[in-house]
Amino acid sequence: MLSASAEVIAARTTLMAQGLTDPKGQDMVELSLMSSEKAEAMAASAGALATNAGAMGERLGQVALDEGSRAMQAAMEMAQARSPVEAAQAQFRYAMGWWGRATSQTLTLNRELAKAQLEAIAPIHKTATANAKRLRKS
């Protein structure tokens, strides 16, 4: 994408420079695409981010509710323990379970963030590479 962007910038800069010497020969279609294509790609990118953020937020909200329920269950087990050892065991079970769930959630969130990043950059990449290909033929 970076290479394609550099090609597009160079080609369009050349077109604009040529337009300074020959205003009637200016490629107005290409110049108008500079704004509209960026706006379309950025809107698609923002849409992808919003969709992914919504899905992550929903999942994380459910995770928080589930964890609250588990914490309440662990607190009840500790309160109902018949000895300090049973209370400590209940606390240990909760802590170890929490550690595993937290690790799993971190890995899941990392995957979701990487997916969101890929989906957000895709429309920008598509536009940049398509522009570079089209301008090479010009």
Image (cartoon, grey):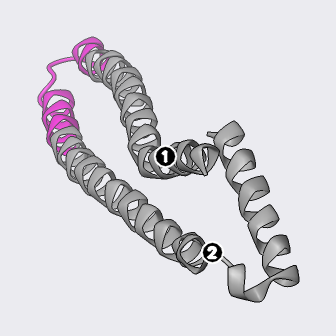
Q: For this view, does 2 lie left or right of residue 17?
A: left
Q: CA distance from mark 1 to mark 2?
A: 18 Å
Mark with earlier residue (1, 2): 2
Q: Which residues are magenta?
A: 68-90
For the residue pair 34 and 29, the one nearer the viewer reads as 29
Q: Which residue in the protein does label 2 denote?
A: 27
Magenta span main SS? helix
Kindly indicate the quadrant of the structure image that contains residue 24.
Answer: bottom right
Residue at x 27% of width, y 23% of height:
94
Residue at x 16% of width, y 23% of height:
81
For the residue pair 44 and 12, the one nearer the viewer reads as 12
Q: Position of residue 61 (x, y in %)?
A: 23, 52
- Residue 87 in magenta? yes
Q: Position of residue 76 (x, y in %)?
A: 13, 36
Kindly indicate the quadrant of the structure image that contains residue 19.
Answer: bottom right
Q: Amino acid at mark 1?
A: Ala
Kindly indicate the quadrant of the structure image that contains residue 15.
Answer: bottom right
- Residue 113 in magenta? no
For the residue pair 91 and 70, the one nearer the viewer reads as 70
CB of mark 1 within 8 Å of CB of mark 2?
Answer: no
Position of residue 104 relative to residue 41, above or below, is above
For the residue pair 120 and 40, the one nearer the viewer reads as 40
Residue at x 33% of width, y 54% of height:
48
Q: For this view, does 27 lie left or right of residue 86?
A: right
Q: Amino acid at mark 2?
A: Asp
Q: For this view, does 73 lie left or right of residue 17?
A: left
Q: Position of residue 54 (x, y in %)?
A: 26, 57
Which element type, helix, strand or loop, lies under badge 2? loop
Q: Residues within 10 Å of mark 2 (few under 14, many from 20)?
A: some
Q: Which residue in the protein does label 1 denote?
A: 130
